[in-house]
Image (cartoon, helix red, strand yellow):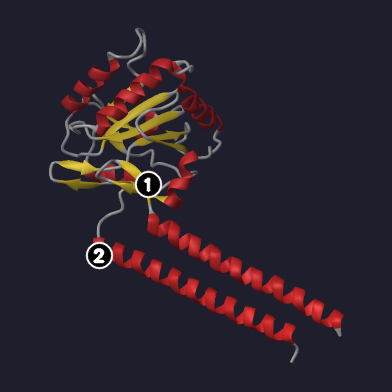
Amino acid sequence: MCRKTVHIRKMFLTCIAAGLFLIGMCRSTYAHMDMANMTKKRPVIGFKEKLGAYVPLDLTFKDENGKDVQLGKLIDRPTILSLVYFHCPDECNLLLAGMANMLSKLDVPPHEYRVITLSFDPTETTAQAMKKKINFYNTLPAGYPETTWRFLTGDQKNIDRLTKAVGFGYVKVGDDYEHPVGLIVLSHDGKIIRYIYGDTFLPFQVKMALIEASQGRIGPTVNRLLDVCYSFDPHTNSYVFDVLRVTGAVCLLTALGFIAFLLITGKKYRREDKGGK
């Protein structure tokens, strides 16, 4: 057997061994991730994007004046939806303040869109909704229509149907909640157009989302990378880098790269062997 062939075979076996080692690492990583998830046994907290899906427009809530309102009657134009609870000590207030600041600078006539803020705490009352509305409505420019920004409360059944429809995962902890923070932009017929994460918003970004909603076009979510590389941390109400998830993905890509290398290198040397005979 020629020296060149022996060298190729040794390299081939070495690459196979390395590839099997990497695959073993990947399996171990994913097994660890699954075991960690099984150990936690807790609901998923965060947004599970459902772009293109529709919210149920037959749901009924109470507005800040205590009147029953059907969701389909409110979502009659492009709509910005926020899910909060009114006695939230921090993040919900930051979200609403960010919304008020954005609405004050938004270059879209207020009668062309709707803003809906719904409490996902079924124990909260219309009095709390009105108090919250007054606090933030007073920060808007003079003449801003009261009917544009609505504050709603509801029962658990209707809240569950809406949060499930938009992929809003949250859990009650004592008197408070762990929950994601962001906005959901809907078209006039209730189609989910875009998710905008965080508690501060660029007016231009929201304007583009409203234009897309008016046309029924689903907009890209810049934060889609969060689903791959980040996981939601309810303790900080933010997305954090997920080392295990990224390590698993890198292992898998590396293993695939080894396989491709072996295939290409094997073909190359087979051609050289044939040419040398």
Position of 220 compared to 56: left or right? right
- Alpha-carbon neighbours of circle 2 within 10 Å: few (<14), some, or many (≥20)? few
- Above or below — where is 231 with respect to 115? below
Q: Is residue 62 visible?
A: no
- Residue most toward the top? 142
Residue designated by label 2: 39
Position of 239 compared to 113: left or right? left
- Alpha-carbon neighbours of circle 1 within 10 Å: few (<14), some, or many (≥20)? some
Amino acid, disc 2: Thr
Label 1 SS: loop
Residue designated by label 1: 167
- Above or below — where is 3 with respect to 205? below
Q: Residue at x 68, y 82 (%)?
A: 7
CB under 8 Å between discs 1 and 2: no
Q: Residue at x 27, y 35 (%)?
A: 84
In this figure, what is the number of numbered marks? Answer: 2
Q: Quadrant of the C terminus?
A: bottom right
Residue 244 occupies quadrant: bottom left
Q: Residue at x 30, y 23 (%)?
A: 97
**Whole-Å distance between the Cαs marked 1 and 2?**
23 Å
Residue 225 x/y as whole percent: 47, 46
- Above or below — where is 110 with respect to 235? above
Q: Quadrant of the N terminus?
A: bottom right
Which is more N-terminal, label 2 or label 1?
2
Amino acid, disc 1: Gly
